[in-house]
């Protein structure tokens, strides 16, 4: 069996047409009769010809490909965001290359370099927790590649962003716990060099101050993003003479770690301790008690991030206005934070 790849020259020879005419037919260009175009497509299928779209796109000065980099693909928030991005790409006849940083800045850098070499038209990125500088994103722009940040963004980088209403959502979550009668709220946060985690912390503090409540400094713990760290932190706080009676976490995995600590401490959820998470991961409604959480509408967030490229950058190349889109979150109140409802403890 021949291993030689069928080329457009072979296809043109089979049809007795010029290469330029066959190219026009394959690319849907005007000036080609429909019956001829159909004959070209039929013969291409018969001889197993695959159109070299990459070469054609490069001739047009565009790869018609976007790249996306997320911290973890196996988290529902990011997989849903990718789904939204992919939907926008499909609607606009673009391809998508997906990379993950595994929360490491050096892996993120390698992914960015790979996407640059792939000549993508735009990189959509949610930064890793180790990323403290926007320098690598500036290098992307030097290669004439567009950048849209989403969710985890560096505000020092003057580019397009699609984010959630992080401060307001966390404020509302804290208010809902206060309304349930919780008095000693603890906040388990993330790395403060990332604006979304700082904003969530500020939303919590705003709700506490508005209610005229006092929260000890050690009830607010930053850079505690993993389930394991949240578990250890909760165990320490629950061992205090006056422990918290509620925890507000900035992720559902944190909330899960906190709930395990509460159970190990012999306490009940939500009777003794309330818990509120963030991201509305699928497991939050499957366990008992179900976890109250904030739904970030991540698929819509991803879709809008991609549409910033398609609607704003691609169609308005001379418009240099920087776009910031805010996607509203939804409060999902479940058993873990509702004292007014009888629940089964974890």
Image: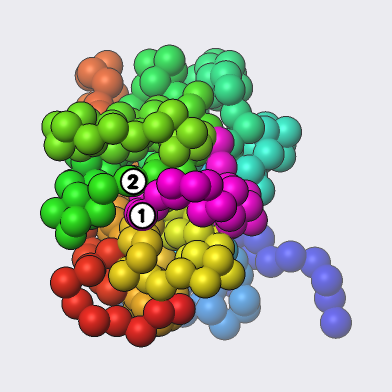
**Is 10 part of what is drawn in magenta?**
no
> For mark 2, what is the residue?
185
Q: Which image quarter is the C terminus in? A: bottom left
Q: Residue at x 48, y 27 (%)?
A: 192
Q: Kindly state the secondary structure of the residue where label 2 is placed.
A: strand
Figure check: 339 above or below 57: below
Q: Position of residue 4 (x, y in %)?
A: 80, 67
Left or right: where 297 falls relative to 242? left
Q: Which image quadrant is residue 323 in?
A: top left
Quadrant containing the N terminus is bottom right
User: Left or right of 172: which side holds 296?
Assistant: right
On the image, the x and y values in percent for residue 76 come to 45, 64
Which numbered tag is attached to residue 291?
Answer: none
Q: Name the residue tied to disc 1.
A: 245
Observer-nearest residue: 52 or 272? 272
Is label 1 in a helix, a strand or a loop? loop
Q: Looking at the image, do the residues carrying marks 1 and 2 touch, with CB atoms under 8 Å apart?
A: yes
Magenta region, residue range: 223-248
Q: Residues within 10 Å of mark 1 (few under 14, many from 20)?
A: some
Compared to residue 293, the image places residue 153 above or below, namely above
Q: Nearer the viewer, residue 149 or 273?
A: 273
């Amino acid at each position: 069996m021949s291993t030689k790849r069928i080329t457009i020259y072979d296809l043109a020879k089979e049809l007795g047409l010029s290469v330029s005419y066959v190219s026009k037919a394959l690319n849907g260009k005007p000036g080609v009769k429909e019956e001829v175009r159909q004959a070209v497509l039929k013969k291409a299928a018969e001889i197993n010809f695959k159109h070299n779209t990459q070469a054609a796109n490069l001739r047009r000065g565009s790869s018609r490909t976007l790249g996306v980099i997320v911290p973890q693909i196996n988290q529902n928030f990011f997989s849903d965001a990718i789904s939204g991005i992919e939907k926008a790409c499909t609607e606009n006849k673009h391809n998508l290359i997906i990379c993950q940083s595994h929360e490491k800045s050096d892996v993120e850098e390698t992914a960015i370099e790979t996407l640059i070499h792939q000549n993508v038209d735009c990189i959509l990125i949610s930064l890793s927790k180790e990323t403290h500088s926007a320098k690598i994103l500036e290098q992307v722009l030097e290669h004439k590649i567009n950048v849209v940040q989403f969710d985890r963004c560096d505000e020092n980088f003057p580019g397009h962003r699609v984010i959630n209403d992080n401060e307001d959502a966390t404020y509302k979550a804290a208010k809902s716990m206060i309304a349930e009668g919780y008095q000693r709220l603890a906040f388990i946060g993330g790395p403060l060099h990332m604006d979304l985690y700082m904003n969530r912390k500020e939303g919590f503090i705003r709700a506490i101050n508005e209610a005229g409540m006092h929260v000890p400094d050690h009830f607010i713990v930053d850079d505690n993003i993993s389930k394991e760290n949240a578990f250890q932190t909760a165990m320490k706080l629950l061992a205090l003479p006056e422990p918290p009676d509620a925890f507000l976490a900035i992720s559902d995995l944190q909330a899960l770690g906190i709930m395990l600590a509460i159970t190990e401490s012999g306490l009940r959820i939500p009777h003794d301790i309330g818990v509120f998470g963030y991201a509305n991961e699928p497991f939050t409604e499957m366990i008992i008690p179900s976890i109250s959480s904030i739904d970030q509408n991540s698929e819509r967030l991803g879709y809008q991030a991609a549409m910033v490229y398609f609607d704003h950058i691609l169609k308005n190349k001379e418009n240099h206005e920087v776009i910031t889109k805010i996607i509203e979150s939804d409060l999902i109140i479940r058993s873990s934070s509702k004292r007014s409802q009888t629940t089964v403890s974890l």
